[in-house]
Image: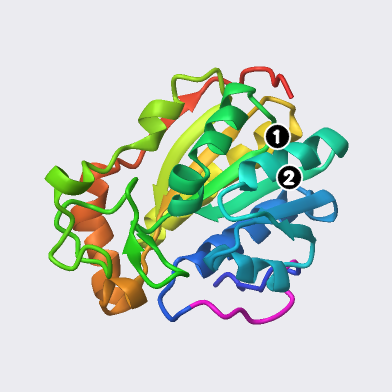
Amino acid sequence: MAATMKKPKMINQQVGWCPGCGHGIIQRLIAECCEELDLAERTIQVVDIACAYWSIDTLNCDGIAGPHGRCAAVATGIKKVYPDSNVYVHAGDGCSYVIGLAETCYAAQRNVPITMIVVNNGIFGMTGGQMCPATTLVGDKTVSSKKGRDSHVAGEPFDMLNIIKNYDIAYAARGALYDPKHINATKKMLKKGFENQRDKKGFSIIEILSPCPTNWKMSPVDAMEKIKNENEKVYPIKVYVDNGGEANG
């Protein structure tokens, strides 16, 4: 018997992301996980003032847009005040690994029991497609690296999960969206992050390789192929930490 796919009840209206953007897939996975774990009624989302902001209007749960880059700090404050809530961050790589690098690292260092979801599309999307110092691949062209990222000028991109795995955290993993198999695997990672928070096991971070066809100036199909053939070579899809450590938050 064929399965019937239904829209999660948490999604209450259409969203404004560009065609082919991965944020919409991620939003649906978040909604499915929260509903399947019976966490929807006590979920609070913290989104960045960037592409992830659209989620505030679309998901039927409490939420706040933090100052650009400060999502981990805002989520930490909310979790301190409402410790029984399901608090998660939905933000990009520029927010989490560049402008908000300190906030992300200190949330991990304190092992705050939140779930942090980082969308790695290798670019600053909302502000016009500038190079992201943390994640733009060497050679990739952006509006601020028109000849392609030059490692002699901008340095090399780095794997943030290789850094953050050294903290005493509960979970760190990276997924991708370029085919159904990887989307399903990414959902399992997200669910693990929410389960860890529910069970008071500490900080969880899930990074997701996501396409940005508009700023990459590619078709949605070609953008997915780029993730598979190029980005994944620099950012491997795997679980970096899964120790279920007790939270300090």
**Residue 17 horizontal/vertical position (percent):** 52, 77
**Residue 104 among those drawn in magenta:** no
Please report whichever mark, 2 or 1, sits nearer to the chain's N-terminal start: 2
Residue pointed to by mark 1: 197
Above or below for 132 versus 195? below
* Residues at circles 2 and 1 in contact by the CB criterion of under 8 Å: yes
Crowdedness near tag 1: few (<14), some (14–19) or many (≥20) residues, C-alpha within 10 Å = many
**Residue 133 horizontal/vertical position (percent):** 32, 49
Range of residues picked out in magenta:
10-17
Above or below for 212 versus 245? below
Residue type marked 1: Gln
In this orientation, does residue 16 appear?
yes
> In which quadrant will I find the N terminus?
bottom right
Above or below for 94 versus 4? above
Q: Is residue 5 left or right of residue 152?
A: right
Residue 32 vs residue 130, the one in the foreground: 130
> In which quadrant will I find the C terminus?
top right
